[in-house]
C-alpha cells in the first residue's frame, strides 16, 4: 500500500480524531504527529492525557490514557504507531503499524500486557510475497508475559529478552507448586512473545489451507489507507469496550 505525503497528513488528522474520542478528551488537542514516515503519540501530548511508559523491549514511548474506570483514575493506557518509508520522491510505502496496551495507575509504573501488530510483506529472492515471521499471522495479537506472571516476576524477567535461549524442564503441578510464593514463577513465559495470534484469517473459507501455501489465508496487508483507518477505528473502540468490562 502506498500514499502521498498529503494523504498521510490527512490520515494522521483522522487518527487523531479517533484517539480523542477513545480517550474522552474535550479539548481537540493534537495527540499524534507525523515525523518523517513515523506516526506516533507526540511527546508534547498534554500530561492530563498522556504519560511516558516503557515497552516490553525496554524502549520509552508516550501512551494515552483510556477513561477506565474514569478520566480521573485511568488504569489503562494505549500507545500506537505507524511506520512508512519513502518509495521514490513523491510516495510513501506502508511498513507496519500497531498498538500496545499498558496497565497501571497514574502514580505507579505501567506494564505492557497486550499488543496488536500489522506488518506489510516483502518480496523475497524468488519473487514470492513473504511476511515477517514466515507463516505468522498478519495482523496479529501478542499476549505479553506480564499478563501471565506477577508484576514483580515480570520486572525481574525483562532480562530474559536479551539472555540466550534455554530449555526449561516441565514442572509437575501438585500441592507444593500450587503453594509456591509469588516470587517463584511456576513457568518461564519468555517464549510467549514468539506466538502470533491472528487478528484476521480467511482459512474458514474453501479451499481449506494446506499448512504450506504462501501467502497464508491469515496473512494480509491493508488494501488502502481508508481500510487502514477503518481497522484503527475498530481496534481502538474494541479495546476500550473490552477493557471497560473489567
Image (tube, grey):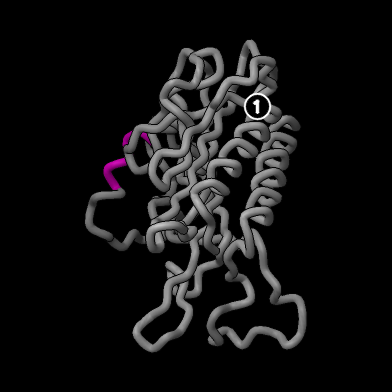
Residues in magenta, as a range: 154-160
12 w.r.t. 136: above or below: above
Can you see residue 171? Answer: no
Front residue of 222 and 134? 222
198 w.r.t. 73: above or below: below
Front residue of 45 and 141? 45
Q: Which residue is mark 1?
A: 20
Quadrant including the N terminus = bottom right
* Residue 195 percent across, percent down from the top left: 49, 61
Quadrant including the C terminus = top right
59 drawn magenta: no
156 drawn magenta: yes
Quarter assignment of residue 206: bottom right
At 48% from the left and 43% from the top, the residue drawn is 81
At 66% from the left and 40% from the top, the residue drawn is 236
At 69% from the left and 76% from the top, the residue drawn is 203
Left or right: where does residue 151 sit relative to residue 48? left
Front residue of 106 and 82? 82
* Residue 2 percent across, percent down from the top left: 52, 61
225 w.r.t. 70: above or below: below
Can you see residue 118? Answer: yes
Quarter assignment of residue 10: top right
Label 1 SS: helix
* Residue 8 percent across, percent down from the top left: 54, 47
Q: Determine the residue located farthest toward the front in the rendered image.
A: 90
* Residue 85 percent across, percent down from the top left: 40, 56
Question: What is the magenta segment's predominant secondary structure?
Answer: helix
Callout 1 crowding tier (Cα within 10 Å): few <14, some 14–19, many ≥20: many
At 38% from the left and 38% from the top, the residue drawn is 184
Amino acid at each position: 500500500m502506498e500514499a502521498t505525503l498529503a494523504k498521510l497528513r490527512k490520515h494522521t488528522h483522522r487518527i487523531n480524531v479517533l484517539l480523542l474520542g477513545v480517550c474522552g478528551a474535550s479539548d481537540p488537542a493534537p495527540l499524534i504527529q507525523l515525523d518523517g514516515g513515523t506516526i506516533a503519540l507526540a511527546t508534547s501530548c498534554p500530561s492530563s492525557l498522556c504519560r511516558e511508559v516503557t515497552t516490553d523491549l525496554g524502549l520509552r514511548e508516550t501512551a494515552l490514557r483510556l477513561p477506565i474506570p474514569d478520566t480521573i483514575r485511568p488504569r489503562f493506557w494505549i500507545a500506537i504507531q505507524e511506520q512508512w518509508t519513502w518509495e521514490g520522491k513523491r510516495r510513501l510505502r506502508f511498513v507496519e503499524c500497531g498498538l500496545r496496551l499498558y496497565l497501571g495507575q497514574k502514580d505507579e509504573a505501567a506494564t505492557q500486557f497486550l499488543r496488536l501488530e500489522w506488518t506489510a510483506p516483502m518480496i523475497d529472492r524468488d519473487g514470492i510475497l513473504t511476511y515477517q515471521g514466515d507463516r505468522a499471522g498478519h495482523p496479529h495479537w501478542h499476549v505479553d508475559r506480564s499478563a501471565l506472571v506477577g508484576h514483580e516476576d515480570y520486572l525481574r524477567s525483562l532480562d530474559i529478552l536479551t539472555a540466550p535461549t534455554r530449555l526449561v524442564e516441565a514442572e509437575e503441578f501438585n500441592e507444593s507448586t500450587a503453594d509456591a510464593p509469588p516470587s517463584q514463577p511456576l513457568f518461564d513465559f519468555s517464549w510467549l512473545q514468539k506466538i502470533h495470534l491472528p487478528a484476521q484469517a480467511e482459512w474458514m473459507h474453501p479451499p481449506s489451507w494446506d499448512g504450506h501455501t504462501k501467502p497464508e489465508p491469515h496473512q494480509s496487508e491493508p488494501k488502502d489507507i481508508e481500510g487502514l483507518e477503518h481497522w484503527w477505528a475498530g481496534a481502538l473502540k474494541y479495546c476500550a469496550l473490552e477493557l471497560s468490562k473489567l
